[in-house]
Image (cartoon, grey):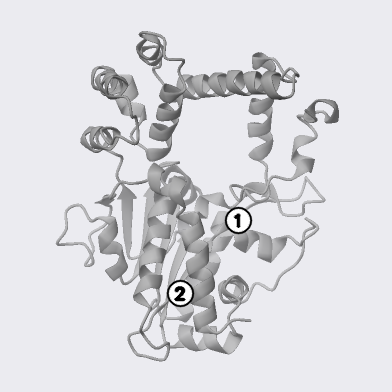
């Protein structure tokens, strides 16, 4: 178990790991938000920015697109808040304990044991007990901080909880459950028990939350404010691409900027950091023949075509690598690979723990044969 100093050290290490070099390169932007509600925290700011979040008090829901940067914004906030605790005694009136937690772990802790078998868990105080498990703090320490309203919860990824899944995993005919709703119920109960005096900042994909509210209006998160993470604008994208380390060749860099300016389809789909990074990967991976980049990018008019090109380039790169290093062929044709990836995507939609990067081998058995898995 941890005391507060040990917990903060462990949290800082985890946050630094999450904010590794690759993440910083992918999300170098200072993001801004669109205000969804009339509120007192941001009423003087037409477009609040990430830097405004560390002063927030209340219950805030941050929504955005997939790959839009919600998680990175929350991790950067956690890094900032942990840094602010340095030099302040834990018993000081000015000390607030930041707790960053990935929401998908609540489902694993509450419903699934280490053997992937369903388990029962007491429903009372599930948020407190989950936070206790995540922080490894002594129970009396966490309880005291909560009672004193000296914790700040940064909860990432409501949309990563499973939904429309059988309540009894061994009985596919049992009633379907939406664990996103169950988490909101537990969180609302926790906040009610603490008189809404604890600050909570939670992230969720915009469409997922709209679906939750539409299907379960009585279970909406009782937040005081809602923000929508704004899409990148063309000026931000152009300034980012002008950095020499992004595309070293000036001619190649200007060519990409010109394509973005004149191709409305491209400029529309790259407004999130993840898609922008995918475009750069595709562009930087072209073979360098004259006009190859322009011709290939001009033909892209939607996200599906962009990812199709991304898969093709990865396939040809790995094929050549296997031939040169192991003198063997890739075990699938390009068409077979795309079909397999499509099958995996369908299987992943039924994952018990979506987006936790822990993909179980049993999930792939219906898609990939043992014979072709070995290379």
- Residue 262 visible in the displayed image: yes
Q: Where does residue 317 sit, x and y in percent of width and height?
A: 58, 21
Horizontal side, residue 371 vs residue 323: left or right:
right
Image quarter in which the C terminus is found = top right
Q: Nearer the viewer, residue 162 or 142?
A: 142
Q: Where does residue 157 sit, x and y in percent of width and height?
A: 50, 54
Q: Residue at x 29, y 57 (%)?
A: 50
Horizontal side, residue 51 vs residue 186: left or right:
left
Quarter assignment of residue 121: bottom right
Crowdedness of circle 1 by 10 Å Cα count: few (<14), some, many (20+)?
Answer: many
The label number, if any, that marks residue 179 in the structure image: 1
Q: Nearer the viewer, residue 267 or 157?
A: 267
Q: Can you name the residue that lies furthest to the front here?
A: 325
Q: Where does residue 30 sit, x and y in percent of width and height?
A: 28, 50
Question: Marks 2 and 1: in contact by CB < 8 Å?
Answer: no
Q: Nearer the viewer, residue 359 or 218?
A: 359
Q: Can you name the residue that lies furthest to the left here?
A: 44
Q: Where does residue 39 sit, x and y in percent of width and height?
A: 23, 63
* Secondary structure beneath label 1: helix
* Secondary structure beneath label 2: helix
- Residue 339 visible in the displayed image: no
Q: Residue at x 52, y 20 (%)?
A: 308
Residue with the mark numbered 2: 191
Q: Nearer the viewer, residue 167 or 58?
A: 58
Horizontal side, residue 264 vs residue 46: left or right:
right
Marked residue nearer the N-terminal end (1 or 2): 1
Quarter assignment of residue 331: top right
Q: CA distance from mark 1 to mark 2?
A: 18 Å
Image quarter in which the N terminus is found = bottom right
The label number, if any, that marks residue 67 in the structure image: none
């Amino acid at each position: 178990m941890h005391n507060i100093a040990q917990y903060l050290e462990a949290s800082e290490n985890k946050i630094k790991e999450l904010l590794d070099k690759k993440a910083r390169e992918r999300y170098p932007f200072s993001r801004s938000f669109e205000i969804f509600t009339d509120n007192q925290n941001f009423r003087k700011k037409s477009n609040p920015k990430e830097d405004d979040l560390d002063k927030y008090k209340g219950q805030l829901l941050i929504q955005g697109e997939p790959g839009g940067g919600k998680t990175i914004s929350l991790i950067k906030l956690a890094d900032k808040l942990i840094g602010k605790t340095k030099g302040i005694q834990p018993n000081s009136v000015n000390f607030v304990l930041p707790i960053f937690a990935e929401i998908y772990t609540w489902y694993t802790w509450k419903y699934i044991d280490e053997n992937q078998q369903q388990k029962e868990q007491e429903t009372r105080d599930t948020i407190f007990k989950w936070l206790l498990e995540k922080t490894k703090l002594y129970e009396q320490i966490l309880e005291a901080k909560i009672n004193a309203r000296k914790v700040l919860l940064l909860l990432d990824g409501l949309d990563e909880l499973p939904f429309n899944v059988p309540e009894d995993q061994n009985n596919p005919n049992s009633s379907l459950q939406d664990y996103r709703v169950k988490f909101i119920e537990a969180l609302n109960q926790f906040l009610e028990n603490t008189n809404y005096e604890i600050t909570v900042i939670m992230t969720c994909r915009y469409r997922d939350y709209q679906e939750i509210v539409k299907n379960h209006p009585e279970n909406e998160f009782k937040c005081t404010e809602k923000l929508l993470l704004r899409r990148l604008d063309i000026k931000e994208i152009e300034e980012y691409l002008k950095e020499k380390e992004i595309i070293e060749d000036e001619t190649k860099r200007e060519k990409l900027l010109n394509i973005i300016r004149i191709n409305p389809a491209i400029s529309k789909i790259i407004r999130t950091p993840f898609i922008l990074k995918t475009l750069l990967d595709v562009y930087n991976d072209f073979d360098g023949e004259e006009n190859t980049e322009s011709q290939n990018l001009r033909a892209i008019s939607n996200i599906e075509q962009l990812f199709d090109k991304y898969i093709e380039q990865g396939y040809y790169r790995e094929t050549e690598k296997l031939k040169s290093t192991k003198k063997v062929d890739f075990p699938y044709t390009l068409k077979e690979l795309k079909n397999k990836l499509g099958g995996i995507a369908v299987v992943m939609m039924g994952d018990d723990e979506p987006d936790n990067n822990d993909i179980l081998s049993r999930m792939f058995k219906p898609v990939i044969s043992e014979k072709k898995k070995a290379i």
